[in-house]
Amino acid sequence: RKSLVPQRCNPSNAVHSPFKSPLSAQKRQRECRKRVPDKGGSDQPPMPKLSVSEHELLIMKILTQPFKIPIANYVPEHSTRCLGMKRSAARRALHDPFACNALVLFSPPELSEHDKLKMDKNKIQVHVVVDPLLGNILRPHQREGVRFMYDCVTGAKGDFNGCIMADEMGLGKTLQCITLLWTLLRQSPDCKPTIGKAIIVCPSSLVKNWYKEFGKWLGCRVNCLSIDGGSKEQTTKELEQFMANQSQRHGTPVLIISYETFRLYATILNNSEVGAVLCDEGHRLKNCENLTYQALMGLKTKRRVLLSGTPIQNDLTEYYSLLHFVNPGMLGSTAEFRKQFENPILRGQDANSTDSEREKAAERLQELAALVNRCMIRRTSALLTKYLPVKFEMVVCVRMTEVQAELYKSFLQSDTIRRSVMEKNASKASLTALSNITSLKKLCNHPDLVYEKIQERADGFENAASILPDNYSTRELRPELGAKLMLLDCMLASIKTNTTDKIVLVSNYTQTLDLFEKLCRKRGYGYVRLDGTMTIKKRGKVVDQFNQPDSNDFIFMLSSKAGGCGLNLIGANRLVMFDPDWNPANDEQAMARVWRDGQKKPCFIYRLLATGTIEEKIFQRQTHKKALSTTVVDNAEDGERHFTQDDLKDLFKLDEQTRSDTHDIFRCKRCTNGVQMKLPPDDSDCMSDLAHWYHCANNKGIPDDILSKSWDITQCVSFVFHHRSNSAVVEQQLAEQRRQQALAKERQEKEEESEDDKENKGYNSHGEEEAEEDEPEDDEKDEDFVL
């Protein structure tokens, strides 16, 4: 059907002809308008240019000078960062390896210019240099520690990638590890990060401390994720996000988590690979069969760093567990290690060992040390003497009060206790013995701690109620019934009255801390208490407040299990270990809270032991373990052999006649009838064996006036071992003091001589009459002096 609309255009033309605007025909071309000259005017010549004056030229010259940095002696830092420019093709280190005080961890092999041209530019290695922000504040031993750990984790030391940082407390292990992680996260010889992310596992009380340390040393340069409380859903989400990010430039590259939380979320944390793991207070991993150890072993990483100031706490098997964690297979299986190393070394350590056993132990020890020293670095706190004030350490033997002694003897003579000691069933005997030991330890502290058992007529306390004084009650504290508490009460009063010092009180039992609280309320002392019931967030605030110089807190009460690790209590310079622990590492950790970086005052450490009781036996066991640690870890030539295995089993006895059971066991050759006839060796200090300390049966020669006066007042101290840190440094300080005193005396004598000369001149010039007038004045002065 055709359209009825008339055709207006030819369809063939519409297709092939270009479109034309209907207005194009009307459009005119634009033309420039011509200027019409003014009537009667003529073309004017152009204006001549003005000549530039000399002043203008000078100003132009100043303004066109090149830009100079307005900082005197500014040295630009070599950096790959640039603005608006393409990076140069040449690869170079992140920090200048030739700068002053630069800590270079890796130096590439030197290449000739010809070799550089032949090599691929993307394969040329560069220096690895510690960030000057950290490198300039590291002490010499810390620089050595960072270099050692870097060589271990990068495989430069051998076919392994793990290491143990076993420096003693107070040497700055935290700062060294932060430096290591920051370097690994930023640099490598291949101009890229060595690792993408790292995990720090530590006790729950130190999670916030690690977070603060990163902020303290690196500021906002690195973001850390600290898992400190929070709901399960939130923690799961944060950990999943952290593990899912596998990029080399991780936004939050450091995860700080506690051992307990790691074990709970091990399934998430073991899913993907991690660059490195760092375990603080690594002696938590001494048992290779517990769940935490197994969870950490499942972590997908080859770089493992373990921090522990006390790698040997009880036996060599625990030592093996730590080494096996950082470098699996280095020492073989557990059975092979025991057969090859542990059994021969322990036989040689025994006091009854033969010469052949000691020789074999020495051989095995050298062989073990050669293996271990490749992946472990250890420096003792003797290094701190260069940077810290002197430390006096005292082991104080305190004779129990009559009430305590009678209760103690009644307990040992009880039929139930005798039967438990003779028990043949090993498992039952060990449980009963543990309970009995705890009761005796509490009794050594104060009768109040066993009052409930006395009322219940529990095992060993069937006849104890009759021994207690009349009207005995635990509501009101009576310090005089417990010898150690009586001595402590006297010492606290002297410290508060005569000094501005603060003190830390450490105990293994929260019941003992309750006694301390009662004593503080009774005497009106300001105090702070930290135990397992305090939340982690509150602990940091309490510690910071106590360390403030203007704080009113005089005493910091500390549970050794809850807060013995990692706390910095430099606000105090005195510490009392009220009762000993079976594990010497716990006591060592607690005692290192005050004598550490930042301390400005001389430190006094007191360890209180009840004379002739189970506390001395525990202390002797500690000495045996420390001798083992000294021999294996510190690689000392000869650990002192004082105790046989039979001596260590002899716990349930009371020696009322001895001044110190520990001193008797030493068979000390320097003392005669309890009097020290020969001084300790010149090179000894408080890190030496106890046999090489000062031995005092009276308060003469005690380095602390507080303890000396308290000994006189209470009359309950029977014996004291004491020594100080690094005698050489102390001798230098004393020599310097003597030199200053001698100089002051010389100046005083010269001044007196000059005054005498002036008086003589006055006498000669004014004659005898003035001299006679002066005499009464001199007499008056003499009378005033006599008065």
Image (cartoon, rainbow, N blue to C red):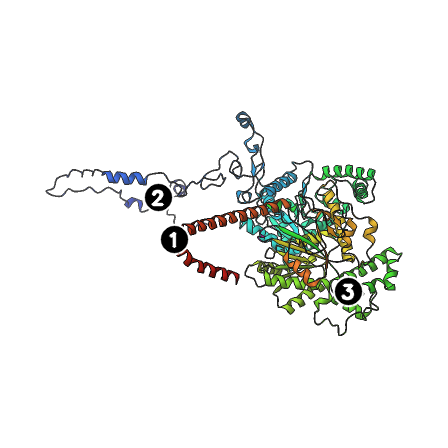
Relative height, residue 34 to residue 724 (above, below): above
Amino acid at the residue labelled 1 = Gly
Q: Do the residues under discs 1 and 3 have CB atoms within 8 angstroms?
A: no
Q: Where 377 sits versus 514, above or below?
A: above
| Residue under numbered circle 1 | 767
Q: Which is closer to the viewer, label 1 or label 3?
A: 1
Picture coordinates of residue 774 (x, y %)?
A: 42, 58
Q: Quadrant of residue 682?
A: top right
Against 107, residue 668 (above or below) is: below
Q: Secondary structure at mark 2?
A: loop
Tag 2 and tag 3, C-beta contact below 8 Å: no
Between discs 1 and 2, the one toward the N terminus: 2
Q: Which residues are magenta?
A: 595-601
What percent of the width, then of the height, locates residue 99? 51, 37
Question: Which residue is identified by label 2?
Answer: 20
Tell me the kind of residue under disc 3: Gln
Q: What label does residue 454 carry, if any?
A: none
> Predominant secondary structure in magenta?
loop
For mark 1, does the 10 Å Cα neighbourhood hold few (<14), some (14 to 19), or many (20 or more) residues? few
Residue that mark 3 sits on: 404
Q: Left of 579 or right of it: where is 413?
A: right
Look at the numbered disc 3 and give the secondary structure of its residue.
Answer: helix
Label located before the other in sequence (1 or 3): 3
